[in-house]
Amino acid sequence: MNLTPVLEMKGIGKRFPGVVALDGVDLEVRQGEIVGLIGENGAGKSTLMKILGGVTERDTGSIEVAGREVEIHSPREASQLGIEFIHQELSVLDNLDVAANIFLRREPTKGGPLKMLKLIDRKRIYAEADHYLQKIGLDLSSHTPLSKLSLAQQQLVEIARALSAGARILIMDEPSSSLTLTETRRLLEIIGELRTHGVSVIYISHRLEEVREIADRVVVLRDGRNAGLLERHEIEHNTMVRMMVGRDLEDFYIHANGGGNREPNWFGVNRLRTLRYPQHAVSFSVGQGEVLGLAGLVGAGRSEVARALFGVDQTIGAEITLAGRPLNIQSSQDSIAEGIYLVPEDRRLSGLIVEFNIRENITLPGLDRYSTGGLVGKAKELEKANEMCRTINIKTPSTEVRAANLSGGNQQKVVLAKWLALSPRVLIFDEPTRGIDVGAKAEIYGLIRDLAREGVAIIAISSEMEEVLGISDRIAVMHEGRITGILSRDQFSEEAVMRLATGGER
C-alpha cells in the first residue's frame, strides 16, 4: 500500500438549520487503502461522504485529491476527479441490460452518416463492459437484462460502472445490508482485489465484523466530530463500539430469560403452509414472555411465516392459537384485533408512511381510540405520541417532525411505538436492527427485553448470527421453508445454527 494520501479532507464543517452536522472533521485516505468509516446514525458519516461525492457543499474546510486542492460542486465533478459513490439504495435501471447500465450517460460514440451526427458504439460498449465484468469476477454476459440479476450481482454492476469511469476513490455505503452471507463474502473479496489494483475504498457499515476484517484503518465519527482513528492492529469490536458511543456497552445482549416462567405454549402455530413453500408445514410455539429467534439463510422462508402470521400473506391451512384459544387470521385487521403485530423488515416501505409525522404514524393503527363521533382528537393523539416518545426514547424535537427526517434507529422506534400504543400480546420483529447503529441497537434490544418481561411473546427474525444468539431464549432454524431444528439456550452456537440453516441435522 502506498502511504501517500490520495485524499485529504481537513476541517470539514457543515451546518443545517438548527443542526451542526460536521464540526472540523478530518479524513485521510491513502492509495490502495480501505478505510472503514463508522459512527452512530447522525454522527456525520453520510454528510461527509455527500460532500466528497458532490451531493452537498461544505461550509468550511478543504479537500485535496492527489495533493491538489479541489472544489466539488456536483457528482459529475466528483467523478471527473475519480471519486465514485455507491449508495445503499442502488441506482441501476432494471429495464436496461448490464452494458447499458455500466456506461449510462458515458456511452462511447462513433461518427454517423452526417458530419454532426454521433452514434452510440454498441460493439465497443459490450466489449468494454465484458472487460469490466471479468475484472470484478462477475461471470455473465453484458447483454443480460439487469432485471434477471440478483441484488448482489446488481451491486457488482455498480462497481463495474465505477471502475469504467476511472474510479480512484470508491465510497461504499452499507454495501452488504441486503446480501446473504455468501454474497457478502464475495463482495469483501472483490473489495480486497480492488485494493491490490490501487483503488482506495471508503467502507461505511454498521456491521463491525466486516469492518474489522477488511479495513486497513478505521475513522470513527461521533456527534459530527472525529472520535478516533484505529490502525490495523488496533481494530477490535469493543474498541470500535466504545469510540462510537463514548462509553462501554456492558451487557449489550441481555436475553429476556422469560420463556417457561409463564404459559410455555402461549402462542401456538401448527401446520402453517406458505404460498412460497406449500410442500412444507411449519409448527412451533412461543411462551408468554419468551423471545423465540427465527434464524436461517436468506430465502429460507422466515419473512413469509411472519407475513402469514400478520395476515398480510395467505396461508394454505394453519392452526393458530393464543392463550389456548383458536384464531382465524385472514387479514392484518384480524391480527391487529388479536394483539398480534409485525415490525417489518423494510420499515420505510411497509412500516411507516414517511411523509406523515411521528404523531400520525404512531396513532394511525388505533385512530378509533383517539376519536369522538368520528372526529380524531389531535390533543389525544399528541398526548399518546409524546408518551411513546418518552417511553422508548425517540430522539426528536417534536412529534410533528416527518418520519422521513428521522435516523434509521428512530424510524424503527416509531414503528415499534405504534404497536406498543396498542398493548401487544405477540410481537414479530423481522430484522429488528437492520441498518441502524450500535447505540440504537442496544436500545432496541433493551425494548425487546422489557417487552418480554411484561409477558409479550416475541418472534425475532435476524440474519445477524451474533444478534440471534444474543437476544433469544430459544432459536428455531429454517431451511427452504421448513424448520430443521429448535435450539434451547444451552445448545446455542454458531456452528449449530449454521448446520441447521444449511439443511443439516442437530
Image (cartoon, rainbow, N blue to C red):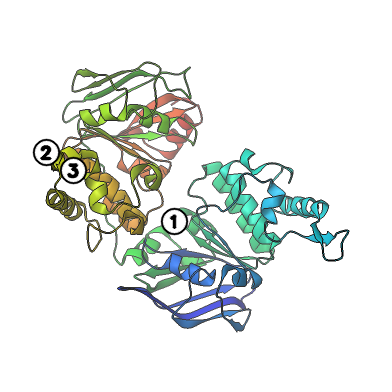
- The amino acid at mark 1 is Leu
| Residue 259 placement, left or right of 241 | left
Q: Which residue is mark 3?
A: 421
Three-letter amino acid code of the residue under disc 2: Gly
Q: Is residue 326 left or right of residue 21?
A: left
Classify residue 114 as left or right of residue 236: right
Q: Does residue 280 lie above or below 121 as drawn?
A: above
Q: Quadrant of the N terminus?
A: bottom right
Q: Which residue is mark 1?
A: 208
Q: Is residue 163 left or right of residue 435?
A: right
The percent coordinates of residue 276 (x first, y second) are: 48, 25
Say whether marks 3 and 2 touch (CB < 8 Å): no
| Residue at x 74% of width, y 43% of height | 141
Q: Which residue is mark 2?
A: 373
Q: Which numbered marker is on residue 395?
A: none
Q: Counting residues from the N terminus, which is met first, the one under dot 1 or under dot 3?
A: 1
Q: Which of these two is toward me, 452 or 252?
A: 452
Residue 13 occupies which quadrant of the picture? bottom left
